Amino acid sequence: MLSPSSSAVILCLFAVIFPVRGDHHIDEHSVECKGNHCPKPMPDVYQKPFRPKSCVDYYVPGKSTCGIYRLFDEHGNSYPAYCDFKSEPGTAWTLVMSWANINRGLPEFRQTPFKYDAPINENSHNWYMYRQSLKRIRSLAAHSTHWRATCNYPSHGVDFTDYVRGNFKDFDIVNFLGSGVCKKVEHVNIRGHIGTHLTARFWQVNDTFTLHIDSGSGGCDFDPRAGSVSSEDNFGFYLVINPKFRCTKRKFSTTQWWFGAHL
């Protein structure tokens, strides 16, 4: 049997270890502790800085608005970029390059492949003369699963007319160099010729061609030669153009290249 003094000691210890308050709130700072005996707070993940690498990081289904957003490259440098969240539900796209037909002769749009640095207006988005730097292009590619090209996005959005889309796993357009190589695409439409999950012929050569399809040539699964002009260029290069192709219909018609991902 415990003596009265022993019982009092136990009650005091119980009160220290399990303090009881009328408002049921325990003040974590009411008990002194020292050194490694103090409880360690759990790390707060929400205190980490938000450093979005692509437009995918901003996407909220049904709520995200298209426009300019701030992104960060692999070196932690921030930059503005245009994000499209609406044109293809469940997908977020970051604009990599855009130019008007009237500017097709500039080397950034005619003869410089994606893997070479040729920025133009990279910090001042516009639809008529714009290309991201190589550091940004590589950073975006590393955080994207897909790529696409569109025509006249500012006026037509995306209705899949004169359009091509593929994924980086099947066709890495940033590092590709070659002439007339059959490469797999998920969907392609040129002047009403439509193909899904097949190969199309692509060109991209340093100091010669930016990435494009020559629809005057056959040889792959996709054959858009009917209605083409000889050596017609689509989605880039544009040495030979066809006004029936939306990207080159008028002098201020535009071409866009995007990197993105499905969510």
Image (cartoon, rainbow, N blue to C red):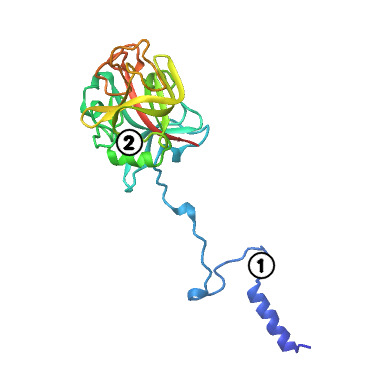
Residue, far right = 1
Q: Is residue 59 above or below residue 251?
A: below
Viewer-proximal residue among 210 and 7? 210
Q: Which residue is mark 1?
A: 21
Specify few, some or many for label 1: CA neighbours under 10 Å numbering under 14, 14-19, or 20 or more: few
Which residue shows up at 75% across the image and 88% down it? Answer: 4
Q: Which kind of residue does numbered mark 1 sit on?
A: Arg
Q: In the rendered image, which quarter is residue 13 located in? A: bottom right
Question: Of the residues tagged 2 and 1, which is closer to the observer?
Answer: 2
| Mark 2 or 1, nearer chain start | 1
Badges 2 and 1: C-beta atoms under 8 Å apart?
no
Viewer-proximal residue among 75 and 36? 75
Query: Residue 25 at what x, y percent from top left?
Result: 63, 63
Identify the disc placed on residue 174. Answer: 2
Q: Is residue 23 above or below residue 155?
A: below
| 255 to the left or right of 25 | left
Which residue shows up at 52% across the image and 72% down it? Answer: 38
Residue, far front = 219
Viewer-proximal residue among 211 and 84? 211
Q: Which kind of residue does numbered mark 2 sit on?
A: Val
Query: Residue 59 at what x, y percent from top left?
Result: 47, 37
